[in-house]
Amino acid sequence: MDKETKEREKADLIYQNYELINNILLELRKAAEKYDWEEIEKRLKGHKLIKELMLRIKTIDIEVLEKF
């Protein structure tokens, strides 16, 4: 599979799961009002969908399945 096809598949998954991803981002923003990011990261250990929070580059690794 070439790079373009892989990127298109990622984009499709994001589009299909837009509402879920948006809700996760909203909840993280709310949490950031109460807790520092290190605390949020600790609380997310073992989360079903959020696999990694990369604070330095402000990135979240979310595992989405093709069908919810």
Image (spheres, helix red, strand yellow):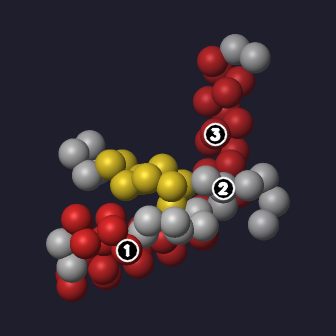
* Contact flag, marks 3 and 2 (Cβ < 8 Å): no
Dot 1 crowding, Cα within 10 Å, few <14, some 14–19, many 20+: few
Quadrant, the N terminus: top right
Q: Which quadrant of the figure has residue 9?
A: top right
Specify the quadrant that holds the C terminus.
bottom right
| Left or right position of 43 against 50 | left
20 on left or right of 35? right
Residue hosting label 1: 43
Amino acid type, mark 2: Val
* Residue occupying image coordinates x 43% and y 53%: 52
Q: N-terminal of the two: label 1 or label 2?
A: 1
Q: Is residue 2 above or below residue 29?
A: above
Which disc, if any, is residue 15?
A: none
Q: Residue at x 44, y 65 (%)?
A: 45
Q: Earlier in the sequence, mark 3 or mark 2?
A: 3
Task: Give the structural element (helix, strand or loop) at label 2.
Answer: loop
Q: Nearer the viewer, mark 3 or mark 2?
A: 2
Circle on res. 64: 2
- The percent coordinates of residue 47 (x first, y second) are 53, 68
Residue on which disc 3 sits = 10
Does residue 8 appear anywhere in the picture? yes
Q: Measured from the top left, where is residue 35 in percent x and y?
A: 21, 79
Q: CA distance from mark 3 to mark 1?
A: 27 Å
At label 3, which amino acid type do we have? Answer: Lys
* Residue located at (67% from left, 27% from top): 6
Q: Residue furthest right?
A: 67
The residues tagged by marks 1 and 2 sit, at their Cα atoms, a distance apart of 20 Å
